[in-house]
Amino acid sequence: MSKSMQTLWSKNVSISKGELHCSGISASALASEFKTPTFFLDEDDFRSRAQTWNIELSKAFGPQAGRVYYAAKAFICVEVARWIADLGIGIDVCTGGELAVALKGGVKAENIEVHGNNKSIEEIEQAVAAGVGAIVMDSLFEIERVAAAANSAGKVQRVLLRLTPGIEAHTHESIATAHEDVKFGFSIASGAAWQAIMETKKHASLELRGFHSHIGSQIFETEPFAIAAERLIELLAKYNEEFDQQLPELDLGGGYGIAYVDGETEIHAADVLGELANQVKQVCAKYSLDVPNISIEPGRAIVGPSMFTLYTVGTTKVVTLENGASRNYVSVDGVMSDNLRTSLYGAEYTAIIANRESTAKKIATRIVGKHCETGDIVIKDIDFASDVTPGDLLATPATGAYGRSMATNYNHISRPPVVAIKDGKARVILRRESIEDLLRLDI
């Protein structure tokens, strides 16, 4: 496997005699035991990536390092929550369901941050009752709801305000979240952020700790993160001038990009956090502010490369196009129900034959699924081995983020399991759904 291809896979994935192995277990053995499609999660790789972000945050900001909050929306289950608890980092959740999983996995409530632009009153009450470390508030309605829940519980709830810094990050429209015309946050430019500050300060049951910003996902440049930080610090300075008090926290979100296809690179924790720290310290010095506690929310950057999906080829079909060219359609036993990103965002992936070596000529290929949908595609265009055949195993790297999280039962297909691999052993941590599961809700 080339060095550039290796960056797409977790550290314990290797190729031997043409067959993929993870921690020494062959793809054929994995498919035989767990069937396909299945998500395979390299536990060591997940843990080391999480630790790296935590270490580099501490290096960059020293005593002013806040917390690494793993973004649960990328992928969460009870076992992964246990890993988070064991690592001692925090977790960012955005629904009552994610909160329940985090607590079930043993994450301390004070290490949980609750997000979301439309939290229900019940979800807010659950978060307050659990004693979460922070609730990120996203609307004026929510300020009132969190205050009421905290007051009813006889608590003072720590809160952050999600702000929109007005940045056009270079990413897909559906995952850009920091420009003005989005559903998230209070705009700094329009004055909505300052209004939210004033409304929050009216409530004795709320303790405003600082500001939050998340500029989007799959971002590779470090500059947008630095610009967002600067705009939040400028508002910190205004707050300090107005109230003669400095807010102690800034959460600068996540969105750090990873590689999905050969030739792409990933953003490295040391690089982005080092530059971010320099910018934060310079701007704070400009306004004579102490550097606040800085937190971040990597999700995809931790779990994305730690997982791959294994499929079995069901059929192949060569289609002649209008221009006379041809394309080989390779159908596997999943796709739209376990990976929506190609359909939603036009996301790009790569794949390999995982059970054998092929020296066959490569031809124009489209890798598709088994759903009754033309858009049921995982890889739209790839030069792939012409001898791929039914029964072959295909592996797609970097599917840890949003694959299983966005999985559906479209066409009443059961969602795949997640299997953790460590030290040459594989174990199910999220089982495959059964037909009984699919029928259970029917009355």
Image: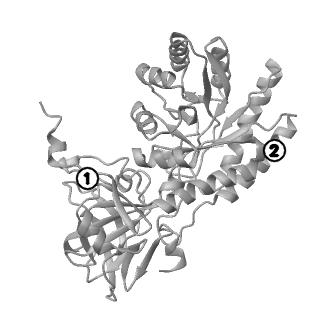
Question: What amino acid type should be assigned to the residue bearing mark 2?
Answer: Lys
- What SS does tag 2 mark? helix
Which residue occupies 47% across, 35% down? 94
Where residue 197 appears, x then y in whole percent? 67, 20
Whether residue 312 is visible to the viewer of this picture, yes or no, is no
- What SS does tag 1 mark? loop
Where residue 212 appears, x then y in whole percent? 63, 34
Real-space CA distance between mark 2 and mark 1, rounded to the nearest whole angstrom: 48 Å
Question: What amino acid type should be assigned to the residue bearing mark 1?
Answer: Arg
Residue annotated with mark 1: 432
Tell us which disc is closer to us: 2 or 1.
1
Which residue occupies 42% across, 79% down? 15
Res 372 → quadrant: bottom left
Nearer the N terminus, badge 2 or badge 1? 2
Whether residue 368 is visible to the viewer of this picture, yes or no, is yes
> Which mark is on residue 281?
2
